[in-house]
Image: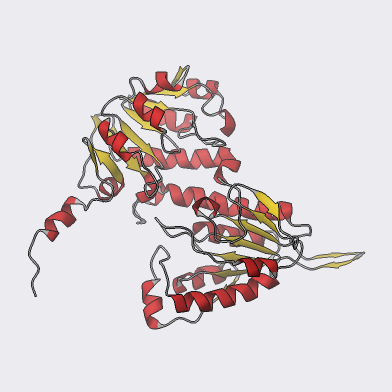
Amino acid sequence: MLIAIPAECVANETRVAATPETVKKLVAMGHSVIVQKGAGLASALPDAAFTDAGASLADNRAAAYANADIVLKVRPPLDEEIAEFKDGAVLISQLAPYQNATFPAMAAKKLSAFAMELLPRTTRAQAMDVLSSQNNIAGYKAVLLAGHYYPRFMPMLMTAAGTVKPARVLILGVGVAGLQAIATAKRLGAVVEAFDVRPSTKEQVESLGAKFVEVPMTDEEKAANDGVYAKEMSDDYKRRQGELVAKHARAADIVITTALIPGKKAPLLLAADVVAAMKPGAVIVDLAAEAGGNCAATRPGEVFVTDNRVTVVGSYNLPGMMAGDASALYAKNLFTFLSLMLSKEGFSINLEDELLEATLVTHAGAVRFGQPSPAVAAQSAVPSQA
């Protein structure tokens, strides 16, 4: 099999979908790898590192795609890229499935496209989980960005000139990014509080030395939000949540928001009046900026200072700001996933594998995303019993 690694086309995307380490493993399995020239430069991976690992180089993207059986990417391909794919090729990438309008074009090229964001959050899938590996980096980088814009120290310092108070940090959303943000802020000496709608995250927050900000919940609300992903809450809960978050945000020096709901606009956690009441010099880092933002004052893709001197960071692609490690982890995720289908003996897609079935969005000329799985379809065809 010929496996292609292109340079990413999206502006400011610095990551690459393979590293010399994963290329060497693919070559050892008996497969060929072609890397577009310059694909790894922004990740501190020169072309020579790939050729030393056994890859060949393509002068441009079209040359990389021309005969490739499998393409590994970081971002969804553009329309012009899809036209360059070999008919029937396999694509493994983050594909932004809930916003992607190119699936019909992929199906028309008979691509077998896997969206890594749809990987089930199971123990077996952990080593392939690109959301976890990249969000972990985003949570770490968010704290460093906050420290960059915050005009004071993070830790408490006792000096001959006096004592400096530690920064108060509030983390909104305790997924992978939020937990890493808590750990990083604690390592830097800040006083940390964290909030999440899932009661089960309280133990994780406290195990990292932070205080859990808890909104009183009914039994129904607890049951509705005790899973892996946060879900939409009732209007009454949102009112109680807003009041409590506002109170803690006004006391905070740094707020990092990470709340996302798959397939929906990011929930609003910081209203404009809350931002207006925050301390001068405070910093907000909104990790949900690409999904509309958790903060009403966020300007997606920008960093700006409000009238009351609060810095709001709406930067995109924080993992890409640490492209070396981000690419290394992402490439390992993709190699592990690809190993479900690729071996020394060849390549095959087993649609009975729950990980492959869940992530395969186009296949055999059809768009599968948004359609019931074969198992669900078969079950729904059986008349229900009253």
Residue under the point 42% across and 72% down: 233
Q: Residue 380's quadrant in the figure? A: bottom left
* 237 with respect to 255 (left or right): left
Residue under the point 67% across and 52% down: 144
In this rendered view, identify the residue nearer to me: 138 or 159: 138
Q: Judge whether 27 appears above or below 253 on screen.
A: above
Residue under the point 44% across and 40% down: 332
Residue 40: % across, % down: 53, 29
> Which quarter of the rendered picture does the C terminus lie within?
bottom left
Residue 17: % across, % down: 45, 35
Residue situated furthest right in the rendering = 161
Residue 338: % across, % down: 34, 38
Whether residue 44 is visible, yes or no, is no
Q: Judge whether 373 appears above or below 341 on screen.
A: below
In this rendered view, identify the residue nearer to me: 54 or 216: 216
Whether residue 13 is visible, yes or no, is yes
Q: Residue 171's quadrant in the figure? A: bottom right
| Total labels drawn | 0
